[in-house]
Image: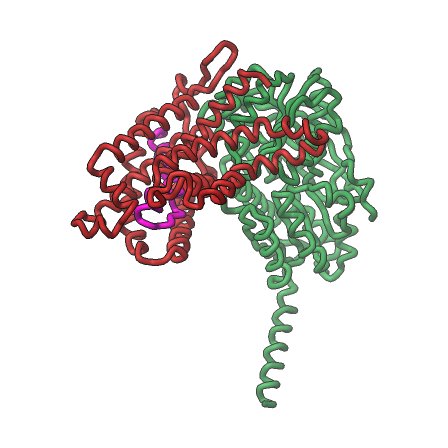
Chain colours: A red, B green
Amino acid sequence: MTWALLLEQTLNGFQLGVLLFLLAAGLTLVFGIMDLVNLAHGSLYMAGAFFCATFTDWTDSFIIGVLLGLPATLLLGIAVEMIALRTLYARDHLDQVLATFGIILFFNELARIIWGPEGLVIPLPAWLDGNVEILAGVFYPTFRILIIAVGLSVALGLYVLVARTRIGMLIRAGASDRDMVGALGINVKMLFTLIFGLGAALAGLAGMMAGPIIEVNIGMGEEILILAFVVIVIGGIGSIRGAFVAALLVGLIDTMGRSFLDLLLKMLISGNAAETAAPALSAMLVYVLMVTVLFFRPQGLFAPRGG
Amino acid sequence: MFLRTIGAGLVVAAMLAATTAQAAEVKIGFVTTLTTPAGVIGRDMKDAFELGLEDIGRKMGGLDVKVMYEDDGFKPEIGKQKTDKLVQKDDVDFVAGYIWSHVLLASRKSVLGAGKFLISSNAGPSQLAGKLCHKNFFSTSWQNDQTPMAMGEVLNQRGVKSLYVIAPNYAAGKNMVAGVQRTFKGKIIGKDMTKWPTQLDFSAELAKARAAKPDGVFIFYPGKAGGAFMKQYQQAGLSGKIPLYSVFTVDSISLPKFQKVNLSGVMGSFMTQFWAPDLDTPQSKKFVSGFKKKYGRYPSFYAAQTYDTVFLIKSAVEAVNGDLKNMDGMRAAMAKANFPSVRGPFKYGKNHFPVQDFYLREVVKDSDGVWTTAARKVVLKDHVDTYAKDCKM
């Protein structure tokens, strides 16, 4: 193990972390403020990736693809909220899980009808497709640096939005006491639609960032959604700050587990046993983290209603 | 009361009559993955099966052929459910298909326990070739370890001394790694088994591989994970620096996508396989040109194996003149491998896996500029898989 490798793996962990944050930010807001368990959040992630792939194909530019894909996902999110989810707020969580699971199936099938089963690729412009030497001898893919930059800027932007603006004040108020916000004469319906659209756009952005790395596929949302739920549970449901810290934590722990757990285990047990155990253990690490956090702080690290 | 009993009896009698009347057709259940992103593989197989049936006029030994396609959803438990349905409800004569080793292993008992024929058109887990081999099981593909064993030989021939292995952590992934380890004479300096099928981002593994400075990287990533891996390999700047050797990763399903984004790193890369679209056998030529004409694309190896499945079943039904009760006759006919195969004439080993040649393939451009693979040379000749010796049959 060298310092160069450690640095590279830290960056990889950061990159996975900010990607998870983009997805978790919307999820935690929707769950925390609207009290809606939205399994279909992953479908918006998928939709963002498909929109971006299509627009990139039409315009031959990834950047334009993203710029067009963002409002498209925002509009889709608003439409989903107004048509389907609005009626679910008053129902209990089980009904919401059932209904949003149905939405997942609907979107997966719709994507197959529109784009076919084989998925799409998002070609990157040459200046993003290579890698750069960040330190002597340490090369890192340019696009992953872009993901980190985009993720951190969004985090900063969200912080400003939530902490410094009137909308943000309403979001925070909504997270701590939804009914009181309504009682004070705020148009809660409107606020919910807006928050959902924002969350959808962020999920879409995550999909657009993941697309060029993992390809755009039907069902891509479900795979990462479980991790996103782990993130919001660790961070505290409804807390953007919690989602950010937890996402980085999960990203780093997952990456470090995949990178160094086999070396670590080899010091303790025989090589063969370590080789078998390491993949299984590293796949469990984030869940172990979640259980540990829940044991000591059942409300999560930064619960808005807990304090 | 009496009337009701008689009524029920009549219904049963009518149902029995209906089943006998239906015996004038061969019923084949085909289990593959039609949904999830892996559905593209299932589509290739279904297309090949349909093409095969068309080529034989949808008749086998004078009987009509009825085929029922079922989707396993890429999950062992669903694959087993669908297999149960085919065997118990539809009462099929043959169950074929199966892309995934873990799905096949989960479904095995449902078919073999009911005394039906099970034909794998792709998956070749070591268990079914060895200890769990069965008289009613046949493969039209290969045992999982064989293709990577051929790759191990290629690595030796090319003077690779140190190898980094990255593969998914499931039945077939483990078989692939075991296969390459068995023949590769150099040192494996690193090995990562990744979460399957959910992990598609290989940043951590690629960073480790780069730091380990191997002579070559060996991978096995079927389906969409393969595309993701190849892309990330290029983005990480590894293509061109460390040669990539793959099995079941670069195929006619992924190449059109690579070509679309001009993933030039894949050009000239090597893999091993029992077949290639340019293989010079009469059946392969007929199959490839028929497939390209009907569907407008190159068939994958999955499709080739599935095409063989049609002709294997046909050879069995014809040998007994359509008497589907004659299991012994059909089994003996299939064991002879007396049908036109895309790989040319071959024999079955005692575990009913083909004894066959394995080729080195290279990614090339065809005369129309389409990216495809071409067979370069035979690496393993008449190869018998390692587990056949454990098969007590």
| Residue B385 picture quarter | top right
Residue B178's x, y, as percent?
A: 71, 32
Whether residue B202 is situated above or below residue B102 in the rendered picture: above
Q: Give the residue at the far left of this rendering.
A: A185
Q: Which residue: 67% across, 46% down?
A: B120
B2 or B140: nearer the viewer? B2
Residue B136's x, y, as percent?
A: 74, 52
Residue A87's x, y, as percent?
A: 29, 56
Task: Answer whether residue B375 is visible to the viewer in this image.
Answer: no
Residue A37 as seen in the image, left or right of residue B368: left
Q: Does the magenta stretch include residue A31?
A: yes
B259 or A49: nearer the viewer? A49
Query: How many numbered circles does the render carry?
Result: 0
Residue range of the region highlighted in magenta in the rendering:
A28-57
The rendered magenta stretch, by its main secondary structure, is classed as helix
Residue A134 as seen in the image, left or right of residue B60: left
Whether residue B35 is situated above or below residue A162 in the rendered picture: below
Q: Give the residue at the far bottom of this rendering.
A: B2
B12 or A170: nearer the viewer? A170
Task: Answer whether residue B344 is visible to the viewer in this image.
Answer: yes
Q: Does the magenta stretch include residue B289?
A: no
Q: Give the residue at the far top of this rendering.
A: A136
B39 or B54: nearer the viewer? B39
| Residue B143 picture quarter | top right
Q: Quadrant of the N terminus of chain B?
A: bottom right
Residue A60 as seen in the image, left or right of residue A283: left
Q: Which residue: 53% across, 23% down?
A: B233
Q: Which residue: 59% across, 56% down?
A: B81
Whether residue B266 is situated above or below residue B81 in the rendered picture: above
Residue A173's x, y, as percent?
A: 25, 43
| Residue A1 picture quarter | top right
Q: Which residue: 68% across, 30% down?
A: A268
